[in-house]
Image (cartoon, rainbow, N blue to C red):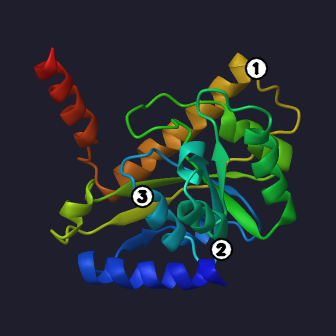
Amino acid sequence: MFYSFLRNVIRVILFIVNGKAKYLNREKLPEGPYILVGPHRTWFDPVYFALAASPRKFGFMAKEELFQGSIFRWLLHHVNGFPVNREHPGPSAIKTPVRMLRQGDISLIIFPSGSRHSQELKAGAAVIAKMAKVPLVPAVYQGPLTFKRLFSRKRVTVAFGDPITIDRKLKLDDDGQASVERQMQDAFNQLDQQINPNFHYVDVTGEKKAEKANKEH
């Protein structure tokens, strides 16, 4: 109930701030649970992913530090967030999302790169998808990369790709994982091209941090 209420509130706020977002290929979304995967480009792209794929509800991983405060812990719990230790993930980083997906009511949003400042894909999403027997659904976000730039009213676009099914017989060793990563990256590239053939992602926040670090040294 709270999840749906909060989603509607955020939808209205973002409409006032940025206008109507454009969602492409929604017909590709499966009816059952799945893992939505995409490149992590801004701190609010998971919000737009969840709005674009509604009415399905989503869960997501969040760094465990965010759960230390009672208010944030309560809020994250009610929007299906669960803590993960980024340095030492542990078995729960796999078992918790697999259990959520098997229940059938909630899908997951996972960024394979793990960070907005990295483009290197990691193995977690493929492992979880195989264990939970759900597909990976590629998605990309194009639009403002900071909250301040949302007020420029440059249109936000989210596009979904064809689901990627992990073969139950596929071994997720280095070769198997590399195969899944290629499928995801190819899908991201195709979706970016569909939205805007001239698109080029620039990590604005990462560049600012790098410039600041260089000045300090």
Image-based side of 104 in relation to 38, left or right = right
Query: Which residue type does callout 2 highlight?
Result: Arg
Quarter placement of the N terminus: bottom right
Q: How crowded is mark 1: few (under 14 residues within 10 Å), some or many (20 or more)?
A: few
The residue beneath circle 3 is: 45
Residue in the picture at 29% in, 54% down = 196
**Where 68 falls versus 16 (above or below)?**
above
Image-based side of 121 in relation to 210, left or right = right
Q: Which mark is residue 56?
A: 2
Q: Is residue 166 visible?
A: no
Q: Name the residue furthest top.
A: 217
How many numbered marks are there? Answer: 3
Q: Do the residues labelled 3 and 1 touch (CB within 8 Å)?
A: no
Q: How crowded is mark 2: few (under 14 residues within 10 Å), some or many (20 or more)?
A: some
Q: Which mark is residue 173?
A: 1
What kind of element bears circle 3?
helix
Q: Nearer the viewer, residue 28 or 153?
A: 153
Which of the two discs, 3 and 1, sits closer to the camera?
3
Q: Name the residue furthest right.
A: 169
